[in-house]
């Protein structure tokens, strides 16, 4: 399997995040990528596909914020990384806001995703890595892996959150649609991919299927419930399969079988897998009970669809086990 990576993703390195009522070291650290590299071995460089594929998913105002936020934050006399502290209770009409604090609140949904000096560079090359892996699959490879960090599936068309800034999986999926492919997205991160769901929720040409922790108890709380099935032209093109805390492989596989049956019925020509290893029993911020040996099983089951597949890395925060958990999944494929 060809694996793609770009070292410029390491430029994204915020210092702190707000978690459980206090500031703690930023969990989505560059060390995550380094652990994966140690586990999977050789990688190929990403290519620059430009900003057009990003604009196909994200709004101009949001991309402009990501590009300038840290500079504007410092110009306003602030120290540290840029981060929001005020949000509208409901999403209101777009406003032409000047103050950086307001613009950050307008384009985010949590306080766990600060924008550091290197965030735009890291996120940009994370997206380019996903697009390069897609290019390999469109060029004839059966499967390719994009080592993406920061991850992407919590980022919506015009908002960031959950350590995510550009939605790598959605960007790759939309580029595949533009190339004439019928696409399904399977999200198997512990946390629901709310950004990906939002982006495609009213569209029927892309299927979104997610297996994740029940949002009644777990982040991102406001998305990912089983009754969210799409709207308008997208009605029926979203399938959420929430599971309770403590789910092990025996509890996970029936949901995976349901997901794979739904994907097969959709008859896609290409599959994008948002793969998060935070379903691991030892993950410090998650509560499933999958073991390292289980990831090979998941990879084998998903590969059984026989679809050309782009695997995009999402979460996973047990750094010491992350390389083995990623490698096991890829070996299953």
Image (spheres, rainbow, N blue to C red):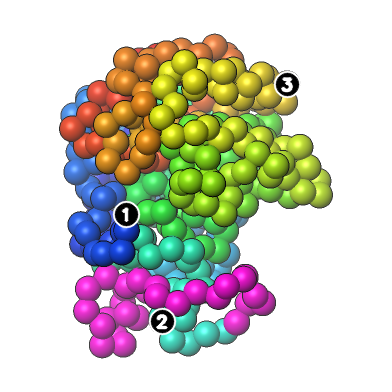
| Direction from residue 306 to residue 136 in the image, left or right | left
Q: Which residue is drawn at 52% across and 25% down?
A: 309
| Magenta stretch, residue numbers | 68-95
- Tag in front: 2 or 1: 2
Residue 4 sits in which quadrant?
top left
Disc 1 or 3, which lies upstream in sequence? 1
Q: Quadrant of the N terminus?
A: top left
Cα separation between marks 1 and 3: 36 Å
Q: With respect to residue 91, does 1 lie above or below?
A: above
**Label 3's element?**
helix
Q: Which residue is drawn at 46% across and 54% down?
A: 166
Q: Main secondary structure of the magenta part?
A: loop
Query: Looking at the image, can residue 3 be seen?
Result: no
Q: From the image, tell me which residue sits under label 2.
A: 100
Residue 71 forms part of the magenta stretch: yes
Front one among 238 and 132: 238
Q: Residue at x 22, y 47 (%)?
A: 30
Q: Where is residue 116 in the image (x, y as percent from the top left)?
A: 28, 66
**Label 1's element?**
helix
Confirm or deny contact between disc 2 and disc 1 (CB under 8 A).
Answer: no
Residue 291 forms part of the magenta stretch: no
Disc 2 or 1, which lies upstream in sequence? 2
Q: From the image, tell me which residue sits under label 3.
A: 265
Query: Looking at the image, can residue 111 be seen?
Result: yes
**Label 2's element?**
helix
Q: From the image, tell me which residue sits under label 1.
A: 122
Q: Residue at x 42, y 13 (%)?
A: 297
């Amino acid at each position: 399997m060809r694996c793609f990576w770009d070292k410029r993703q390491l430029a994204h390195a915020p210092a702190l995040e707000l978690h459980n009522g206090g500031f703690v070291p930023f969990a989505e650290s560059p060390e995550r990528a380094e652990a994966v590299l140690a586990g999977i071995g050789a990688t190929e460089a990403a290519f620059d596909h430009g900003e057009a594929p990003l604009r196909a998913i994200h709004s101009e105002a949001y991309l402009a914020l990501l590009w300038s936020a840290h500079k504007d934050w410092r110009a306003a006399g602030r120290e540290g990384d840029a981060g929001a502290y005020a949000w509208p209770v409901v999403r209101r009409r777009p406003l032409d806001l000047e103050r950086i604090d307001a613009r950050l609140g307008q384009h985010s949904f949590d306080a766990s995703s600060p924008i550091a000096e290197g965030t735009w560079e890291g996120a940009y090359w994370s997206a380019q890595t996903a697009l390069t892996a897609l290019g390999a699959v469109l060029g004839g490879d059966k499967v390719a892996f994009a080592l993406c960090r920061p991850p992407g599936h919590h980022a919506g068309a015009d908002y960031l959150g959950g350590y995510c800034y550009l939605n790598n999986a959605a960007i790759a999926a939309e580029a595949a649609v533009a190339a004439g492919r019928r696409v399904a997205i399977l999200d198997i991160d512990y946390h629901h991919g709310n950004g990906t769901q939002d982006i495609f929720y009213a569209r029927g040409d892309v299927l979104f299927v997610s297996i994740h922790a029940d949002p009644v108890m777990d982040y991102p709380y406001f998305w990912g419930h089983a009754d969210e099935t799409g709207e308008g032209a997208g009605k029926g093109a979203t399938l959420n399969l929430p599971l309770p805390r403590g789910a092990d492989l025996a509890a996970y596989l029936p949901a995976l079988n349901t997901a794979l049956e739904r994907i097969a019925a959709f008859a896609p020509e290409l599959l994008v897998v948002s793969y998060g290893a935070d379903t691991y029993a030892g993950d410090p911020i998650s509560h499933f009970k999958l073991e390292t040996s289980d990831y090979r099983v998941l990879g084998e089951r998903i590969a059984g669809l026989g679809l050309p597949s782009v695997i995009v890395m999402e979460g996973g925060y047990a750094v010491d086990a992350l390389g083995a958990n990623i490698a096991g999944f890829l070996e299953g494929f």
